[in-house]
Structures are given as C-alpha cells and as structure tokens.
Image: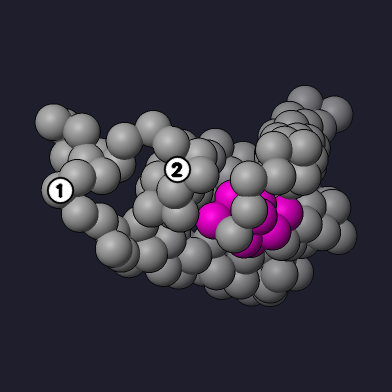
Amino acid sequence: MDQFDAYGHAIASLSLWGMMIVVLSMLSTRHRTDAQRCDCGKPKRDYSSPVYRRERAFMNAVEMAPAFVAVTVAAMLAGGTPFVVNLFASVFVVSRIAMAVIHIGTENQPMRSLAFVVGILCIFILGGSAMRAVFF
C-alpha cells in the first residue's frame, strides 16, 4: 500500500465523507411527524422547516457521494499529483460540511449555492487530475 502513502489527506477525506453521510442520515429522521410527511414518507417541501432541510442536506450528500468517491479514487489510482488530490479532496469535504451546516441551520440560499459550487469545482479538478495523469 506504499503507493497510497502520499494520499493520506484524500483517504482521510473519503473516510470523513462516509461518516458525514451516516451522521446526516441520522439527523434527517429527527422530529419527523406524520403531519410533516407526504404520502411517500418524505418530509413535505417546506424550506422553513428544519425537518425538510435536514432531509435535503442528507439527500444532497448522498447524490454527491458517487462523483466524489469516483474522481478521488481515480485520481489516486492514476497517480495524480498528491498535493492536488489531497488539497481538493479536503476542500470538497470542508465545503460540503459547510453546506450541510448552512442548509440545516438557515434558509440562506446564496451561501448554500456557494458551498455547492466549491464542491462541484473540486470534483472537476479531481477528475481533471485523474485524466491528466492518464493522458499526459
């Protein structure tokens, strides 16, 4: 496993991301009542409701997980520059933690969007690092 020693931060970021999704999963079910649920069991769409915002923060994290894991693992396997891979994997996780806190705690759409865009840019940079290592 020596070939992965240089990617310690990226590996820690993957681990932290997995744990964060589990925590958000637990938070997403707190204080749900039958009155707040649609027929499908999900909370009714209402951004003023913390119950709805917790569910959305969890679902957003789940939706982003495959892309983050794929590009981070691809960048490590392809031999992407460790500094770049570590930096952007770490920034991704920090931006997504910030997004979850903003999403759950406030209705501040511009700040949530900013954190989302930072995370998306990290995914593209990590994917680009993998592609660069393979093709150039």
Q: Position of residue 15 (x, y in %)?
A: 52, 68
- The residue shown at (61%, 71%) is 12
Q: Which residue corresponds to the image point at 31% horizontal and 35% vertical from the top-left?
A: 44
Mark 1 Cα shell of 10 Å, populated few (<14), some (14-19), many (≥20): few
Give yes or no for residue 108 being in the magenta stretch: no
Disc 2 and disc 1: Cα gap in Å? 18 Å
Q: Residues within 10 Å of mark 2 (few under 14, many from 20)?
A: many
Q: Which residues are magenta?
A: 95-104
Count of numbered circles on the image? 2
Q: Earlier in the sequence, mark 2 or mark 1?
A: 1
Q: Which residue is mark 1?
A: 34
Query: Of helix, strand and loop, which one carries label 2?
Result: helix
Q: At 63% from the left edge and 45% from the top edge, which residue is drawn?
A: 107
Residue 98: say if magenta.
Answer: yes
Of marks 2 and 1, the one in the foreground: 1
Residue 70, label in figure: none
- Residue for badge 2: 56
Q: Is residue 85 visible?
A: no
